[in-house]
Amino acid sequence: MVLFAPARPKTVTLTIDGAAVTAEEGTTIWAAARQAGIDIPVLCHDERYDPVGVCRMCVVDIGQRAYAAACVRPCEDGLNVKTATPDVVRCRATLAEMLLADQPARERDPKQTTTGDNELLALADRFGLPGAGGLPAGPGRGEDLSNPVIAVNHDACILCDRCVRACDDIQGNDVIGRSGKGYATRIAFDLNDPMGASSCVTCGECVAACPTGALTNKPIHDVPIRPRGELDAVDSVCPYCGVGCALTYHVDRQRGAIAFAEGRDQPGSKGRLCVKGRYGWDYAASPQRLTVPLIRRDGAYPKGPLSADVRGEMSGAGSDARGEKGRNAPQGRSGGGRRGDQGGKRGGRKPGGLVDYDEVLPHFREATWDEALDLVAARLSGIYAAGGPGAIAGFGSAKCSNEEAYLFQKLIRTGFHTNNVDHCTRLCHASSVAALFEGIGSGAVSTTYGDVANADVAIVTGSNPTANHPVASSFFKQARRNGTTIIYVDPRADTMSDHADIFCQLKPGTDVAFYNAVMHEVIRLGLTDAEFIERRTTNFAALAQTVQDYPPQRAAQITGVDADLIRRVARAWGEAGAGVIFWGMGISQHTTGTDNARCLIAMCAITGNVGRPGSGLHPLRGQNNVQGASDMGLIPMFYPDYQKADDAGVRARFEQAWGTVELDPQRGLTVTEIIGSALKGGVRGMYMMGENPFLSDPNINKVRKALSALDFLVVQDIFLTETAEFADVILPASSYLEKDGTYTNTDRRVQLGRKVLDPPGQARVDWEVVQDVANRIGLGWSYSSAREIFDEIVSVTRNYAGLRYDNLGSTGKLYPNPDPARSDGTVVMFGERFNTPDGLAHLVPAEWLPARELPSADYPLVLNTGRLLQHWHTGSMTRRSYALDAISPRPQVYLNPADAAELGLADGEMARVSSRRGTIVLQTRVSRAEARGNCFIPFHFREAAANLLTIDEIDPVGKIPEFKFCAVRVEAAGPPKQDVLWRGSSRGCPASRPGRASSPGPA
Ligand code: SF4
Ligand code: SF4
C-alpha cells in the first residue's frame, strides 16, 4: 500500500509559436521553447549558468507592453509566446548590429579564436549583417596578452558575464569580476591584474564560454590553425589525472596536428577541463620524441647514468648527490651515432630542464625493430634461464591503456613465470588499496566524486584537489555552494582550504591521531550508527577501545589542531545525514599509510556512511589509468580483478584461461622491493613500459645504483627519460594520442581513448610491441586489435562483465554495470553487503606512530613532496607542453614566510635543500600555504629532483614509500638566477576567507 505518493512537480501550459507546450513550473520560456525544438538566440545565456538576462538577444513577444527576456522569464499558464515575429527579429538584429558596431575590426575568423565559435559573428550571419564594424579611433579598452595561451581583447567584450559565471559557478575559481564605469567598464582579473599575473589557473572555461572572441585561445603551434570547419573532431579522454575528463580534440589532418581541445559532456566532467587537459596536449609533437629503436653502444658500458642531471652533478638549479658524483658514469663514451632529427641540436639543454640529447644520445645507436626486439627477447630469456623467475621483473604504466596493462602483466606472468610486475600505484594509493581490501574487500571507490552533490558533509583530506584533481575539485566547490559542508584536513593551506567550511591544518604524519580523536568524540557523543555497526561491521569494540585513548586534548598536542576544532569536526561528521570522505596521497604516502586509510574506513563505517547516496570512501586516483592498471592485474599480488596471485584455485583458473602451465605460486615483489632486489643481485633483467622510477621513486641515489646494477634493462617510452639512460635497449612507443584503448578513471568509469595522431617515425603502439616480445619468447599471441584484448579482459574480470567497446558509448560506463545498454553503471556500491567473504566491514584500530625520520638540529624542517597543477608526475609530458612549461617552468621550494625570513631567503632567491641523502638547489617560493617548520617541493623536476631527498622507508602493508615526510635543512644559495621571470609570490597562497573556521596551524 502506498501511503505517500511522491509529490509531482506542478506544470504549466502555454503556447509558444502556436504550439501548446507543457513545462514544469519555474521553467524559463527559453528552456521550454528549447524543449519544444524552438531555437531562441542568446548571447549572455548558457544553460549551465544561472540566467542573468543582460544581453536581451532572447526577447520574445508575450503580448505585454514590453518584450520579455526568455532566458529569465518563467513560463506561466496560458501565456502566448511569439518568438520570431518580424518585429522581434528586427529588435534582435538591431541589437546585434549595435554590438557589432562596437566590435574591433578584425578578420571574420580571427586566427586567435582557435575554437572558431564566435556567436556574435554567427548572429551577424543569421541576420544578414556585415560583421564587425571596428571601434572608432581612440584608446579603446585594451587587450591583455599576459597569459601564455589565452588572449583578452577587452574591445570585443560585450559584458555578458558568461566568463564570470563560468569561472565562478562552474570551475569555482572566482577570478573574474568587473572594473571601471560606463564605457570604460571591463572584465577584471582579481584586482584588475594582468590575467597572467592574477590567480587565474588557465582552465580555459572562460574562453569556452565567451561568445564574442573577447577571450580566445592563442595558437599553441607557430603555424596558424585552420578554421574549425576544416578540422576533424575526435572524441577522447584527457590523458593526465584520474578524473578522466571527456574531451574532443580538433585535429588539422593536413598538418597532422591538434588545433585545440574542448571539454565534452560526461557525468564526471560535464564539459570542464583544467589547464592540462585543455592546453597540455602538444607534448606528443615534441621534437624530442623517440622515433627509432636504440641499442646502447659497447663503449657505454659498464652502465650508469649518461647526463649530468642524472649523475647528480648539476649545480645551481639542479642536484648535487654528494658522495655519488660520477660514481656510475660510463667509463668510455663512444660519441657519434647521432641521427638526423633525434640527436644534434634537436634536444640541446633546454631551459625547462629537459634531457640534453647531445649529451645522452651518442651512447646509443639506431637499430631496426627486429634487431632490438630480438635482443630484448634473447637477453630477458637468458637471464630467466640462468636466474629463474626471481631474476626478472616488469614495471608497467598507469598511463597506458587497460589493454596494454593487461598484456604486459600477462607477458611477465606467462613468459617469465613470475609475479614481479608492478606499477606506480605502489607509489600513490597502495596503502589505501591494502586497507580497503582488508576493510571492505574492494580497492575501488565506493562512490563517485560527483556524488558529493548528495552529501551533507564531505571530508577532503591529504589531498590538494585543485592542483591534482582540478575538475573533481570543481564538483566539491559547487557542492559547497549548494549546501554541502566541506571539511578540509591537510598540512598545507592550499587553495582547497579557501573553499572549506572547516579547515584543520594538522602537522604532517599525525592523521591517525586526528581521526582517532574524531571517532573518540563521535562515540562519546553517541553519534554512531548503532544499527549499521551491529548489522554490517565487525570489531567495533576493539576500535572503540583504541580511540578511547585519543581525547581531543591529547590529539591537539600531537596534531597541532585545536581540540575544539576536532570536536566541531566530530559533531559535523556524526550528525551528517550523508557523509563522504575523499583522500589523496597525503593519507597514503606515509609509513603509516595503511593505518591512515583504516581510520577513514572506520570513520565511515561507525557512522553508517557507506552504501547510500552522498556517502562513502573515495581515494582520488592519481594517473589517468591507475585504477584500470590495477584492475588489469598490474600488481604483484593480484591477477586481473584483484584475484589473489597466491590462491591455488585462482591460479588454476588463469592457467586455463591463458593456456599456460606453472604460473608463479608466490606473490611477486613490489616496485620498491624490486629496486632493493636489483641492488642485491636478485632481479637482473627488467622490462620498463612507460615508467620512470629514476625520478618517481624515493631516494634516487639508491635507484641510480639499482638501475646501474641490472644486467639488462629495456625501456619502452615516448621520450628519453632519466630511467632510459640506464637502458640497454630503448623502444620508441606511442603516446596516448596515437592509439585506441580503454581507460578507467577514479570513479570506475571505463572510457574509450581514441587515436588522434599517427605515431612519429617508427614509434609503435605499446601493446603491439609487448606482443612482439611475447611471440619472440614463444607465447604465440595473435591479438589484432585493442578491442579483441578488451574482450579477453572482460572474460576474466567479473567487474568488467558486460562491457564492450560497442556499449561504452561516448561517455563510457561505470563498473559494475549489469545492464550497460541502458545504464551508466553503479554509482554507490555496498548498499547491502561489502565484498569481504562475510559481507561485513572489518574495522581495524590503529595507534598513532611518528614518522620514521623526525626533524633534528641538523635537519630541522619537514619536507612534503607532491604535484603542481601544471605538471604531471616526472614531467616528461608536461615539461614538453608549451603552456604548462611556460606557466610553471622551474623547481621551487615552498617556504613559510617566517621560516624564509629566518633563513634569510626572499622570493626567487636560490635555496639549497639537503637531507641525509643528498642536496638540491632550487628557487625559493615564499608561501602562506606552508605551516612553520614545513616545506614543500614538487617532484617533477629532474634538475632539482625532490626524490633525491626523500626517504625510502615504506609502509609495512602497502609497501608505499614515505614521500610526505623526511627531515631537511634549507640554506641560502645565492641571488635569483638571471633567467628567472618571477611571477609574484602570492599566486596560489589563499587569503583567509571571513567566516571560515580554521586551526592556527601547527607551531
Ligand atoms: S582561465 Fe579559468 S581560472 Fe582563469 S579566468 Fe578563465 S575561467 Fe577563471
Ligand atoms: S582534471 Fe584531470 S582529467 Fe580533467 S582535464 Fe584536468 S588533468 Fe585532465
Image: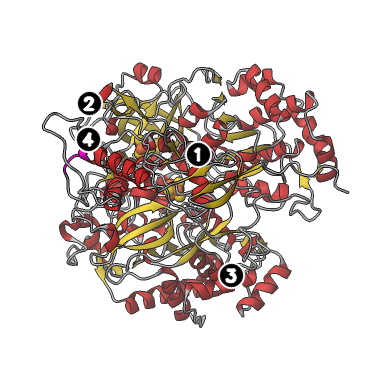
| Residue 452: percent from left, percent from top | 60, 40
Secondary-structure class at tag 2 = loop
Considering only order in the chain, which callout, 3 or 1, is on the residue closer to the N terminus?
A: 1
- Identify residue for label 3: 793
Can residue 208 be seen here? The reply is: no
Label at residue 155: 4
Amino acid at pointer 1: Ser
In terms of image quadrants, where is residue 65? top left
Q: Viewer-proximal residue, 350 or 279?
A: 279
Magenta stretch holds residue 103: yes
Locate residue 911, reporting x and y percent.
31, 29
Secondary structure under the numbered disc 4 in the rendered image: helix
Q: Is mark 3 within 8 Å of ligand 2?
A: no
Q: Could you tell me how far apart the alpha carbons at marks 1 and 3 are, in whole angstroms?
A: 32 Å
Q: Which-is-in-front pick, marks 4 and 2?
A: 4
Q: Position of residue 222 (x, y in %)?
A: 19, 53
First in residue order: circle 4 vs circle 1: 4
The three-letter amino acid code for the residue at tag 2 is Pro
Choose mark 3 or mark 4, whichever is in front.
4
From the image, state whether disc 2 or disc 3 is nearer to you: 3
Q: Residue at x 36, y 71 (%)?
A: 764
Question: Quarter-wise, where is residue 685 in the image?
Answer: bottom left
Q: Is residue 647 above or below residue 615?
A: below
